């Protein structure tokens, strides 16, 4: 949508993702991401942690299910989404506070200090592959004829010419 503020946050998950379903059966996952800025203090020659910023992030539908299956407490993540207006509340000690909320567009593990294995989910049982020319996905059809290698770009090329 026009006029929405899109931000990217890099931080750690405070808790395991909380997966729930609406009455209509739509999956919703909530996660809290904490990001602590670090600065180098030249006078003391050491790193100093700043105040942690906590952001409540919400994912919907398939993204929500993928988040719940893939991420756990402490995971370092990169989150991109639309910032929502802050909601004001009062803490248990009576302090006035505001919480940042983000509606997730994309989320994934940070590969700066870790590795990840990606498993693509199949839709409706059919194998889906990205078209090498961009745009829509194409359904991969098995082909036993090598002459059709140029007609089906999703197959791995061979050293033999297909003609």
Image (cartoon, rainbow, N blue to C red):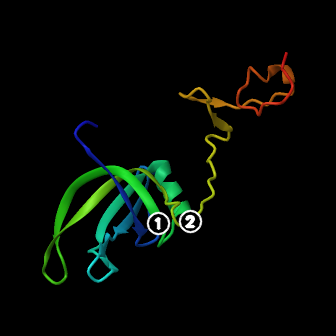
- Any mark on residue 114, and which? 2
| 44 displayed left or right of 108 | left
Up/down of 157 relative to 163, above or below: below
Residue 113, position as x, y percentages in the image: 53, 67
Q: Residue at x 75, y 21 (%)?
A: 150
**C-beta proximity under 8 Å, tags 1 and 2:** yes
Residue 69, position as x, y percentages in the image: 55, 61
Residue 31, position as x, y percentages in the image: 40, 64
Closer-to-camera residue (17/8): 8
Residue 50, position as x, y percentages in the image: 27, 74
Q: Is residue 21 visible?
A: no
- Say whether disc 1 or disc 2 marks the residue closer to the N-terminus: 1
| 53 displayed left or right of 86 | right
Q: Around disc 1, counting alpha carbons within 10 Å, would you say few (fewer than 14), some (14 to 19), or many (20 or more)?
A: many
Q: Residue at x 46, y 49 (%)?
A: 61
Q: Around disc 2, counting alpha carbons within 10 Å, would you say few (fewer than 14), some (14 to 19), or many (20 or more)?
A: few
Up/down of 46 relative to 16, above or below: below
Q: Residue at x 47, y 72 (%)?
A: 73
Check disc 1 and report its element: helix, strand or loop. Answer: strand
Q: Residue at x 59, y 26 (%)?
A: 133
Q: Quadrant of residue 53?
A: bottom left
Q: Quadrant of residue 158?
A: top right
Closer-to-camera residue (113/91): 113
| 132 displayed left or right of 83 | right
Q: Residue tagged by mark 1?
A: 76
Mark pair 1, 2: CA separation:
9 Å
**Quadrant occupied by the C terminus:** top right
Check disc 2 and report its element: helix, strand or loop. Answer: loop
**Quadrant occupied by the N terminus:** top left
Up/down of 12 relative to 155, above or below: below
């Amino acid at each position: 949508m026009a006029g929405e503020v899109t931000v990217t946050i890099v931080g750690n998950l405070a808790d395991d993702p909380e997966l729930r379903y609406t009455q209509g059966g739509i999956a919703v996952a909530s996660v809290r991401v904490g990001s602590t800025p670090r600065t180098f203090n030249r006078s003391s020659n050491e790193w100093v942690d700043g105040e942690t910023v906590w952001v409540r992030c919400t994912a919907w539908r398939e993204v929500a299910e993928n988040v719940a299956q893939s991420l756990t407490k402490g995971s370092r993540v990169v989150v991109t989404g639309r910032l929502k207006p802050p909601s004001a509340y009062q803490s248990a000690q009576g302090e006035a506070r505001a919480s940042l909320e983000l509606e997730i567009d994309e989320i994934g593990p940070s590969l700066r200090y870790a590795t990840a294995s990606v498993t693509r989910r199949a839709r409706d049982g059919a194998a889906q592959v990205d078209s090498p020319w961009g745009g829509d996905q194409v359904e991969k059809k098995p082909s036993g004829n090598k002459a059709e290698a140029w007609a089906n770009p999703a197959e791995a090329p061979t050293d033999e010419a297909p003609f």
